Image (spheres, grey):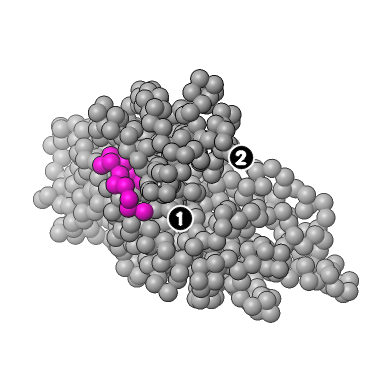
C-alpha cells in the first residue's frame, strides 16, 4: 500500500491532536476511523482527546456536530485547527470520510458480498490510497456539502455491510436488510414498525382480526367482500372509500411508533397485488379520482388524525401497480410522502430524454406527482428481474436520470437491484459505488462521474482496467435507438408498446442483430483475457465474475440454434460451454432469474444441452402495455 507524507497547512500531521468536542458513539467512531486511516496512510498515530479540554495542544483536528435534519458537513481551517463539523452525528462521520478522500483514500467495495456464508468467492475489501509522496491540505482549504437526497438507500449484495454503507453515505434501511440505525453510525432514516416500509394495508387493518367482524373494511371482488389472506402479497386491499377503518389503522400506527419512537416515516400503502375493491362506492371514486386519487383520499384521512400526535413523521404511500395512474385530482396532505415505483421506465435512455416515449410518460408522471405531494420518493428498479445476468445499458445515463429526479423535487431514492442474489455478474459493485456518489450529489460534472468510474475500475480490476472500460463503453452504446424496461428486459417500440413474438410474448430486448452476437462476444472475451493477464488473484476472480454476463449473453442468443442443427461437434462444444456457465453460477453463487430463483434453479444442471434461452425465466409481464 502507498504511504504519504501528509501536512496540514504546511504542518506535519504528527504534530496534530484529534479532539472530539461532544463525545457520542458516532463521534467516537468517527475519530477512530480518522486515526486508523491516517495511521495506514502516514504511519503516524495521532492522539485523541474527548470533551472541551484540549490539554494544551496547539494544532488540532476538531470533530463536532449539530442536530440538523439535513445530512451535510463543513471542512475548514480556523487558524491552525482543522475543523470537521457535521450537521448531525451521522454527518460528522461523513466529514471524516470526505477528509480521508481528499488525501487520497477510496472505498470501493465491502469485505464480502455474502452474509452468513463462509465459503465461495468473496469480493474482499477493496480500499485504496491513490496518493503518493507529499500531500498537503492548504490553510485556505474549505469544503461545505449537503446531501441532495434526504433518504439514500440501495438493496444490493454489494451494499449489505453497515460500515461500508456509512463510508458511501447510505443513510437509510429499507426492509430491515441491515442495521444502520445503530448509534455508532449516527442513526439512520427509518420507518415505524418492523418490516413495515411498504405494502402495509394488511398489517394496519389485520384481516385475521377484522375479516369476520368488519368485512366492509376489505375489498369487494365479484360482489363478495374478501376476508381471507394474511400476507402482504395476497391479502385483499382495503376498501379505500370506507373510512371507518381509519381509526383501526391509526391505532396500529401508534403501536408502531411506540416500538420505534425515532422513526421519521410510517407507511400506509397498498398490499402487493391488484385486488382493489370494486364496490359501487370505490368504482365511483375511481371514475372521478382514479385509483391513485382514491388512495390519496384514504391516506389523507389517516394523515389528519395521525398528524395531531406525530406532526413531524411523514406518512408514506405508493404510486404502484394499479395506483400508478397518477393525476392531480387530489392534493396530498402536507405530511403525506408519495413513493413512485416506475417499473416501466426505459433503461437505455435518460429519464429526461424527450425522444423516448416511455421516459416522456415517466417524466410527465413525476411532474404531476410533484404538484400533488410536497415530498416524493422513488423506488428505483435498477436490475432485470427476468434476466438477472443481463448487464443493463444505463451506466452512462444514470447521472442524468438522477439529476432529473432531483430537479423534479424527489427527496428519497431506494434503489433495488437483484435482491435475492448472493452475487451477480452485472458490475453491481461499480453500480453501487456510482449510485452512492450520485444520490449524494447528482449535479457532479461528467468529468467527475467519469473519474469515479475509472478510479473504481482500476482499483477493483487492476492494471488492465482499461480493457474493462472499453467493454463497458461499447456495451453501453450498442443501440441508442433501442427501448427496453429493466423489470423484464422486454423490448419496447417507439410508440411505447411491447414488441411481441408470434405467441404474443414480449420479446427479449435485442441489443444487437443476431449475426453480431458472436463477434461481439469474442471481442469482449478478448478484452477480459487482456485484463486478467495484468491482475492479481483476487482481481482475476472479479474479472471472471464480470465475464459471466458475456458467457450467458452469447449462449442465450446462439445455443438454441446450434442444438437444433446437425453439427454434433458444435453441439458438444456448446453443451460444454453451457456446463461452464452453470459451473460459474454455482462457483460465484449467482442466480439467472429473480422470482423463480427463490425456488428451483437446479434443474439446468441435470441437462447441460438444454438451451439457455429455454431456462425457466420469470416470464410474466405485469399488466398490459407500458403506455
Question: How many other residues sit within 10 Å of disc 1, few (<14), some (14-19) or many (≥20)?
Answer: many
Pointer 1 residue: 342
The residue furthest left is: 79
Q: Main secondary structure of the magenta part?
A: loop
Percent coordinates x, y for residue 533 in the rendering:
61, 69
Q: Residue 459: give its label.
A: none
Q: Nearer the viewer, residue 196 or 6?
A: 196
When asked about the image quadrant of residue 468, the answer is: bottom right
Up-down relation of residue 479 to residue 235 (above or below): below
Up-down relation of residue 95 to residue 481 (above or below): above
Q: Nearer the viewer, residue 470 or 597?
A: 597
Percent coordinates x, y for residue 455 in the rendering:
42, 64
For marks 2 and 1, give the one nearer the viewer.
1
Q: Is residue 330 magenta?
A: yes
Q: Which residues are magenta?
A: 327-340
Q: Nearer the viewer, residue 613 or 389?
A: 613
Question: How many other residues sit within 10 Å of disc 2, few (<14), some (14-19) or many (≥20)?
Answer: few
Q: Describe the element under mark 2 as helix, strand or loop.
A: loop
Up-down relation of residue 49 to residue 419 (above or below): above
Q: Is 109 positioned to the left or the right of 547 in the image? A: left
Tell me which residue sits at (61%, 40%) in the image. Answer: 117
Tell me which residue sits at (48%, 23%) in the image. Answer: 214
Q: Is 358 positioned to the left or the right of 409 in the image? A: right
For marks 2 and 1 on the same chain, the one whose residue lies earlier in the sequence: 2
Q: Is residue 527 magenta?
A: no
Tell me which residue sits at (13%, 43%) in the image. Answer: 58
Q: Is residue 240 at least partly visible in the picture? A: yes
Pointer 2 residue: 117
Amino acid at each position: 500500500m502507498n504511504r504519504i507524507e501528509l501536512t496540514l497547512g504546511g504542518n506535519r500531521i504528527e504534530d496534530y491532536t484529534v479532539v472530539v468536542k461532544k463525545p457520542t458513539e458516532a463521534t467516537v467512531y468517527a475519530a477512530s476511523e480518522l486515526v486508523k486511516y491516517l495511521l495506514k496512510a502516514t504511519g503516524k498515530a495521532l492522539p485523541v482527546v474527548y470533551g472541551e479540554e484540549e490539554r494544551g495542544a496547539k494544532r488540532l483536528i476538531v470533530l463536532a456536530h449539530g442536530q440538523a435534519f439535513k445530512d451535510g458537513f463543513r471542512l475548514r481551517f480556523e487558524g491552525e485547527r482543522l475543523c470537521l463539523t457535521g450537521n448531525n452525528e451521522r454527518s460528522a462521520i461523513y466529514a471524516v470520510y470526505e477528509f480521508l478522500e481528499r488525501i487520497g483514500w477510496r472505498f470501493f467495495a465491502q469485505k464480502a458480498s455474502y452474509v452468513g456464508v463462509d465459503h465461495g468467492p468473496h469480493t474482499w475489501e477493496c480500499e485504496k490510497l491513490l496518493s503518493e509522496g507529499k500531500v498537503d491540505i492548504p490553510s485556505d482549504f474549505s469544503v461545505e456539502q449537503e446531501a441532495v437526497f434526504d433518504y439514500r438507500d440501495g438493496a444490493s449484495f454489494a451494499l449489505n455491510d453497515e460500515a461500508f454503507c456509512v463510508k458511501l453515505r447510505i443513510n437509510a434501511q429499507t426492509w430491515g436488510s441491515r442495521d444502520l440505525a445503530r448509534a455508532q453510525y449516527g442513526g439512520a432514516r427509518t420507518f415505524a414498525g418492523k418490516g413495515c416500509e411498504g405494502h402495509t394495508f394488511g398489517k394496519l387493518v389485520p384481516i385475521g382480526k377484522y375479516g369476520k367482524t368488519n368485512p366492509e373494511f376489505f375489498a369487494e371482488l365479484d360482489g363478495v367482500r374478501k376476508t381471507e389472506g394474511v400476507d402482504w402479497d395476497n391479502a385483499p386491499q382495503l376498501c379505500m372509500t370506507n373510512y371507518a377503518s381509519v381509526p383501526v389503522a391509526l391505532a396500529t400506527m401508534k403501536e408502531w411508533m411506540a416500538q420505534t419512537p425515532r422513526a421519521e416515516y410510517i407507511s400506509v400503502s397498498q398490499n402487493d397485488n391488484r385486488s382493489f375493491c370494486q364496490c359501487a362506492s370505490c368504482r365511483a371514486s375511481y371514475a372521478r379520482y382514479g385509483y391513485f386519487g382514491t388512495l390519496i383520499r384514504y391516506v389523507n384521512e389517516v394523515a389528519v388524525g395521525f398528524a395531531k400526535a406525530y406532526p413531524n413523521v411523514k406518512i408514506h404511500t405508493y404510486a404502484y401497480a394499479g395506483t400508478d395512474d397518477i393525476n392531480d385530482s387530489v392534493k396530498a396532505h402536507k405530511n403525506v410522502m408519495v413513493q413512485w415505483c416506475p417499473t416501466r421506465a426505459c433503461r437505455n435512455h435518460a429519464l429526461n430524454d424527450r425522444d423516448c416515449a416511455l421516459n416522456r410518460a415517466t417524466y410527465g408522471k413525476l411532474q404531476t406527482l410533484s404538484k400533488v405531494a410536497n415530498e416524493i420518493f422513488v423506488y428505483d428498479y435498477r436490475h432485470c428481474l427476468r434476466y438477472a445476468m443481463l448487464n443493463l445499458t444505463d451506466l452512462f445515463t444514470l447521472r442524468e436520470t438522477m439529476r432529473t429526479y432531483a430537479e423534479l423535487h424527489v427527496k428519497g431514492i431506494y434503489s433495488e437491484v437483484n435482491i435475492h442474489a448472493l452475487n451477480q455478474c452485472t458490475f453491481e459493485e461499480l453500480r453501487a459505488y456510482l449510485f452512492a456518489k450520485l444520490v449524494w450529489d447528482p449535479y457532479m460534472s461528467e468529468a467527475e462521474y467519469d473519474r469515479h468510474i475509472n478510479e473504481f475500475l482500476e482499483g477493483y480490476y487492476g492494471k488492465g482496467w482499461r480493457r474493462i472500460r472499453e467493454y463497458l463503453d461499447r456495451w453501453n452504446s450498442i443501440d441508442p435507438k433501442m427501448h427496453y424496461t429493466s423489470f423484464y428486459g422486454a423490448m419496447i417500440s417507439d410508440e411505447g408498446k411491447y414488441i411481441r413474438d408470434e405467441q404474443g410474448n414480449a420479446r427479449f430486448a435485442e441489443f444487437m442483430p443476431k449475426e453480431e452476437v458472436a463477434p461481439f462476444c469474442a471481442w469482449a472475451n478478448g478484452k477480459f483475457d487482456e485484463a486478467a493477464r495484468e491482475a492479481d488473484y483476487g482481481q482475476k476472480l472479479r474479472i471472471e465474475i464480470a465475464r459471466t454476463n458475456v458467457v450467458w449473453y452469447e449462449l442465450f442468443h446462439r445455443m438454441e440454434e446450434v442444438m437444433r442443427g446437425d453439427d454434433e461437434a458444435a453441439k458438444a462444444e456448446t453443451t460444454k460451454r453451457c456446463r461452464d456457465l452453470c459451473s460459474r453460477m454455482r462457483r460465484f453463487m449467482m442466480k439467472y432469474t429473480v422470482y423463480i430463483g427463490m425456488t428451483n434453479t437446479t434443474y439446468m444442471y441435470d441437462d447441460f444441452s438444454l438451451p439457455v434461452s429455454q431456462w425457466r425465466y420469470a416470464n410474466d409481464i405485469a399488466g398490459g402495455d407500458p403506455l
